[in-house]
Image: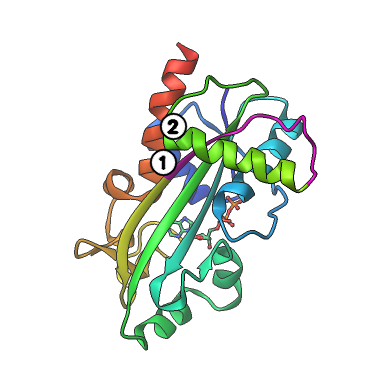
Amino acid sequence: MLRYVTTNRGKVREAREYLGSGVQQLDFDYTEIQAPELGPIAARGAREAYRYADAPVLVDDAGLFLSAFDGFPGPYSSYVEDKLGVDRVADLTLAEENRRASFRCVLAYCDGEGFDASPDPVDRADRAVAAAEDDAGEETDALPVKLFEGVVRGRIVDPRGDGGFGYDPVFEHDGTTFAEMTAAEKNAVSHRGRALAKFGEWYRERTQ
Ligand code: ITT
């Protein structure tokens, strides 16, 4: 059975819309390394979670990237939400001319087995992670991890809506904030929904 590794129940709710109610939450706080990209953070987390659970795991690492601040808070979005709060992040952005933002989500899958090479970008990202770890002189027998990424573009607005979680009330996509959408509507366009769709397609083939 697949474990969705996160402490955030909002993420699990959205994942179940895609992967079915059989997906179990693994409430495991893996070590989040400091890195400018989400991929290496999620990959490292997936290896740690797999070793902990000894079962197939899917780690979900996400962040809000603000154009006016060169992508900040990005991988630090959780810390910034805790320290500043969503409303202050919105206020700081609304004081800027450029309110463009994107959400990114990286899903990292690990089940202890290898993967067939494929020409898609997901696999290339995977190899980049492995190469980076080799360069850093880390474990060369690193567990294989497969990455799936989703991105959605939008803009920061004053908070609207009471659905979703995190930065959803201040992130507007096509005239509607994520907090004004149902989970299904958000999934249809969101960073997580896009990453889950890619993962779901690949996982069904793998487990057939
Ligand atoms: P886990 O690490 O345990 O999964 P987390 O909430 O800390 O839980 P992240 O490290 O991925 O998750 O944090 C990303 C931050 O971005 C955090 O503040 C979330 O609330 C926020 N976030 C992630 N996905 C989001 C989404 O779909 N909508 C709104 N905010 C989101």
At 28% across and 48% down in the image, what residue appears? 189
Residue holding disc 2: 199
Q: Which amino acid type corresponds to the residue marked 2 in the rendered image?
A: Phe
Circle 1: element type: helix
Query: Which residues are drawn in magenta?
Result: 137-149
Q: Is residue 20 visible?
A: no
Q: Quadrant of the N terminus?
A: top right
Q: How many marks?
A: 2
Q: Main secondary structure of the magenta part?
A: loop
Q: Give the residue pinned by disc 1.
A: 195
Identify the residue at image location x=41%, y=84%. Answer: 91
Drawn side of residue 133 relative to residue 93, left or right: right
CB within 8 Å, label 1 to label 2 = yes
Residue at left offset 54%, top offset 65%: 77
Q: Which residue in the rendered view is the most extreme toward the top?
A: 208
Q: Residue at x 40, y 46 (%)?
A: 150
Q: Is 1 within the magenta? A: no
| Distance from mark 1 CB to nearest ligand 1 atom below 8 Å | no
Q: How was this image coloured?
A: rainbow
- Work out whether 197 lies above or below 79: above
- Mark 2 secondary-structure assignment: helix
- Residue 94, relative to residue 49: is it above or below? below
Q: Amino acid at mark 1?
A: Ala
- Image: 30 above or below 199: below
Q: Residue furthest left?
A: 175
